[in-house]
Image (cartoon, coloured by chain):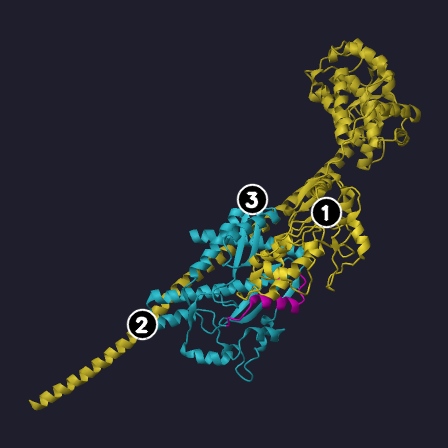
Chain colours: A yellow, B cyan
Amino acid sequence: MADPSPQPPPPASTQSPLQPLQQLAALTELETPSVAPSVSKPDTPGPTATATPELISAPSPAVSYTVIVPSFSAWFSWDEIHDTERRLLPEFFDGKSTFRNPSSYKYLRNAIISKFRSQPTSKLSYTEARRGLVGDVGSVRKVFDFLEEWGLINYTPPKKGKEETEARGALGKKDDSSGKRICTSCGAGCSLQCFTTAKANMTLCAKCFVKSNYQRPGLSSADFKRVDLLEEPRPDWTDKETLHLLEAILHYGEDWKKVTEYVASRPVKDCIARFVKLPFGEQFIGPKEEHNGYTEQGGDDTDENESIKRRRLSPLADASNPIMAQVAFLSAIVGPHVAETAAQAAVSALSNLGANEATDLTTETNEEHEKLYSTPCCSVDGCGSDLSNCRDYHRRHKVCEAHSKASIVLVGGQEQRFCQQCSRFHLLSEFDGVKRSCRNRLDLLNFRRRRPQSETVNTSLSSASHQDSAVNEPVLSAELEIEEEERELEKSFSDIIEFQMKEMQEKLVSFEEMDAIMARERLQVQYLRDLILPDQLAIAQHQHRLAMMVRENVSTWEKLRSTNDVIDRGTTLLL
Amino acid sequence: MKSSSLAGAIGASSRERERASASASVSSIKFRMPTKEKEKESLIPIHLDLDLDAHRYKDAFTWNPHDPDSLVLSFAKRTVKDLELPPTFVSHISQSIQHQLAEFRSFGGQDMFIHEKIVPLKLDLRVNNTVVRDTFLWDISNFESDPEEFAVTLCNDLDVADPEVAPAIAVAIREQLYEIATQSVSAVKEAKLGKKGRRGYELSKGGNNALDVSRYFGSKGSGVIRKRKDWYMNGPTVDVLTNEEVGTLEELNSRFRRKLDEKEDSFLQG
């Protein structure tokens, strides 16, 4: 046979015959660039990575895009059917079948090609093509295979023959690893996550996915797969960078922006994280060495050691930064070992999350704080009473029952009182009179209750030793009770309403069920009726026939009777 | 548009044919789809509705049963690959297609009676965002009829933007024609087995969808114009829904379908 078998995509040597295809049909909106620049485009000897994205990442398909068609398919034209087609798809042209004829072939071919060209960057799949075409799937399959083989659809021009597959492979990998996918609906770059679906070949950024802004309505959220795009792993800090960082911190203190500028290679977060992770340097060697002496004893120190430690740390405790003060206080109570572990855990959590530094630290230290069940000991100076017998509350806050109610105690060498609202010791100056809660808390409480200042009700430990407020107490308690009753009323109202709603709902549900049952029964009855119908008809028929027969019988019977009578009469006459 | 749906489907001189056929002149031919194909060929509608694991695959298309059977497997593989379904679908799809093909082939060679009948066909389908609803008359005995052409013309006339609507319409029409053809075959079978004689045959035939055309249209005046009250039913309606409406529709449908399935199961058991 003299048929030229379709050649595989041309090897590297035939680069010159690559021509852009001139569009004949007026339907397509693709521009037709002149020959020279378009030929130069695929010929640029740049690296494959840059050349192929140039073509593939064309902005919108309606704007200029060069359609590359291999040289062996240069015969293609919209309006005509070429000899090659006639030869290779004979079943369309031999007139043997009514639905495979030249006009249907042309319709299928043109439809498939224009569908591909409307989105030239994505590969047209057979299923997508046949979905939009009227005709039987076998014919569509034949035409599709033919067009694909001859490079009229799904054809990407090769750069340099051998590297063609490599380029395609590299491009594919690059798409995944470059992390720069563009959302099909909003056009924004997707950095963190994107959602892809294969059904319509779409990529959506997280925002569009949440908005459910799917182009095609046949999709649902279940069709989408989530793709997490990994960020680049941060390379480790070199010594140079660490040195820079320390110098910058020395110079600029806490101004992280300037520090980042100085370090020059890292974003702000990285700088901060790195700084926090740095081991304590010369600044803190002094007290730490002394702490090391106590590590083994942990929380079972004698009171003396504890007080010494506390005294040393008290400058920190009085630092202007309240957070640092609390951290110092907690770490002092907890003991050096636990504090160290807590700090390490906090730092590692920080590097994982990257944000919410303060809350992590505090949660970690709070958790550590919880663990000091193991060392229950009142924290008041000179009172080392064992708290194992006391309530949880006392154990947690490291204060024995007596000292929690005492007016003045010595903690850390200072006169303090245990505030029952904050559950900690405050300086005596924080308290008004003999109140057991500090001023700040009381103000808050009063504000909440919208009551004038200075008179408060101690809710946690109700005791009768408030001489100043003795007069107002019954009034206040009455008001409290009123409030409570109101609340109860509201609650009972809402309960009633809830119950009624439930009742209505249940009624609705039971009605629905009734409806369904009725429908079912109706179906049953209809079904039975249908079954019976032919039999009824047959019976009616039979009855009709029987009736006829009976009538006939009756009539014959009558006739016989009458003849009998006649005969009888005749005989009687004769006789 | 109404006139086109009238004229397009009814063959010429249908009324006279109707009168002449009062004496039950039947032509018995071999089973085939009553559409424009040569004797040995028919295009049959294939319906796929599979629900495995978490994937739902619903599809309907036209198949040429004279294509080689190897095409079934390659088609199934291609579809699964294109839609990225799990590979268990391949065997299910090919089985389903072959089952329907076998069903069609089992009818081959049997007789069917194509009485001159005009049958009302209904369209009620939703493709992506477009809902098409239509009722029109189709002449069964017209073997030159072409559902594809009808579908393409309908979409062009109504300016339907979505190209996937036309094949869905063609498949829907083919399905109904296929059903009518199989019914007529089974009617013949019943007649032969039932030994009801001529009268029985008439009776079972009367259960079909035939229309008494003379009664259908206005008796007075021109017999070609429908009664005014029926006009609204017989024009095509095309609605384009927004995405949310589609979503709610699908939800209602699935809920309704689930309920029906449950009721059906309990009904069949009970």
Question: Please, what secondary structure does the residue beneath circle 1 have?
Answer: helix
Q: Give the Cα distance between marks 2 and 1.
A: 93 Å
In the image, taking residue A248 as reference, residue A97 lies left or right, namely left
Relative to B202, residue B164 above or below: above
First-in-chain label (2 vs 1): 1
Judging by the rendered image, the residue that carries numbered circle 3 is: B87
Q: Tell me: A116 left or right of B169.
A: right
On screen, residue A523 above or below A175: below
> What residue do we see at 78% from left, 43% from top?
A50
| View extreme (right): residue | A251
On the image, the x and y values in percent for residue B22 come to: 43, 79
Secondary structure of residue under mark 3: loop
- Provide the residue designation for mark 1: A13
Q: Nearer the viewer, residue A555 or B110?
A: B110
A557 lies above or below B239 = below
> What secondary structure is marked by label 2?
helix
Q: Nearer the viewer, mark 3 or mark 1?
A: 1
Is there CB contact under 8 Å for labels 3 and 1? Answer: no
* Residue B11 pos. (x, y %): 53, 76
Q: Is residue B164 visible?
A: no
- Mark 2, Cα crowd under 10 Å, few <14 / some 14-19 / many 20+, is few
Q: Does the residue at mark 3 contact the one at mark 2 (Cβ under 8 Å)?
A: no
Determine the image quadrant of residue A380.
top right
User: Is label 2 or label 1 in front?
Assistant: 1
Query: Mark on residue A333?
Result: none
Disc 2: which residue: A543
| Residue A362 in which image quadrant | top right
Give the CA distance from mark 3 to mark 1: 40 Å
